[in-house]
Image (cartoon, rainbow, N blue to C red):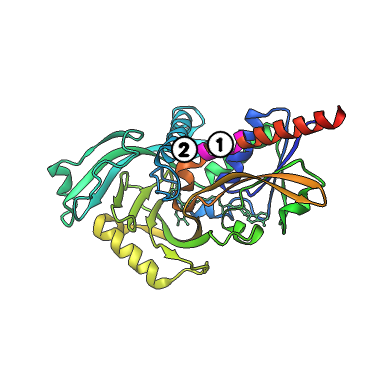
Amino acid sequence: MAAPKVAVVGAGVIGLSTALCIAETCPSCSVMVLSDQFSPNTTSDIAAGMLIPHTYPGTPMHVQKQWFKETFTYLFAISNSAEASEAGIHLVSGWQVFKNTPKEELPFWSDVVLGFRPMSEAELQKFPQHRFGQAFTTLKCDCPPYLLWLEKRLKATGVQMYTRKVADLWELHSEYNIVVNCAGIGAHQLVGDEKLFPVRGQVLKVHAPWVKNFIRDGDGLTYIYPGIHRVTLGGTREKESWSLSPDPGATKGIFDRCCSLEPSLRGAQDIKVKVGLRPSRQCVRLQREVLSQGGVKLPVVHNYGHGAGGFSVHRGTAKEAARLVGECIAALQGSSLRAKL
Ligand code: FAD
């Protein structure tokens, strides 16, 4: 069989990292990224990019932990290299604070991040409305720099990228041997997945270079995530809302909530409002499927539905998707061998 041609649909953090893992694990493959939007116009560009996992109720916990660990290890190595600032990857320390002590004092990812510990009484004095807290150091991906870095890596490995809206995965069957679906919320229409729904998120990106530590309210709604150039203030979570228009009331609410956690933010400047749709699902859809019409088959690997935690697990899910692509190639090679006999 000639070099397999693989099309990856989608150029957010999931599509780009999946294409990179496929190119790394299968150098003989010809990989192409097809997407109707590239950075800076994807949901991934809106994200804060913090490595604090979101929980997928339909995915076994040990699998989620493995994805997070692989992603953390991969990005930690980048943060410790000369490429760190170009890739937009950096370590950031801070606090997750709770008004009431949570039932689960040790989250499943506590031994993956660095230096996880309960906050001291002295630290808690910074947050008079909160009674309990956790201090740790994690990683943050600044977007779009990280997406641009992934694109650069892809080009260096020979992966080509084309602007194209795919109406139906089957339309790719005559050009490609394998299709990988990383369309994020676009998969709702592309493959008619009714289990996939948007969770609208509005954030503010502000200039406040004196804010060096992250602060996250344990309810997950209010957060302050400092990046290399801008601080992300969040947020909102509106299930089933498809609106990409900023809501001025939400902007004021986010700003006030963040200022109550970090009063110095009242001096923040150049406030930009961004809205994105988290591609949410009970579990990430990471599986093989074979489409078939009139005896012709097209192997597909799905990798979408990362909800609020795509950055936190992207490398782990990309590795698994690349492994599934490897299985598809082995199956194709097996059937072409059988056809020759
Ligand atoms: P996307 O980035 O949406 O990419 C999908 C791609 O598919 C796009 O390029 C799109 O153009 C393309 N596409 C779609 N349909 C088609 C089609 N029919 N044909 C061709 N191309 C198509 N996660 C974290 O881990 N940490 C955070 O701190 C964090 N903060 C967030 C804050 C906000 C406000 C939001 C909204 C999300 C946040 N997330 C965070 C979640 C994270 O952004 C997502 O999980 C992640 O971006 C999903 O990536 P994706 O590549 O699947 O989707």
Q: Residue 321 colored magenta?
A: yes
Q: Amino acid at mark 1?
A: Glu
Majority secondary structure of magenta residues: helix
x and y percentages locating residue 301 in the rendered image? 64, 44
Q: Is residue 1 something one can see in this rendering?
A: no
Image quadrant holding the N terminus, namely top right
- Residue at image point 38% right, 44% down: 52
Q: Tell me: is circle 2 under 8 Å from ligand 1.
A: no
Give the distance between the C-alpha atoms of the residues marked 1 and 2, in whole angstroms. Answer: 9 Å
Q: Residue 72 colored magenta?
A: no
Q: Secondary structure at mark 2?
A: helix
x and y percentages locating residue 265 in the rendered image? 30, 57
Q: Is residue 43 something one can see in this rendering?
A: yes
How many numbered discs? Answer: 2
Question: Residue at label 1?
Answer: 320
Q: Quadrant of residue 151?
A: top right
- Which one is in front, 332 or 103? 332
Contact between marks 1 and 2 (CB within 8 A): the answer is yes
In the image, is 29 to the left or to the right of 60? right
- Residue at image point 63% right, 29% down: 24
- The stretch in magenta equals 316-323
x and y percentages locating residue 117 in the rendered image? 23, 37
Question: Residue at label 2?
Answer: 67
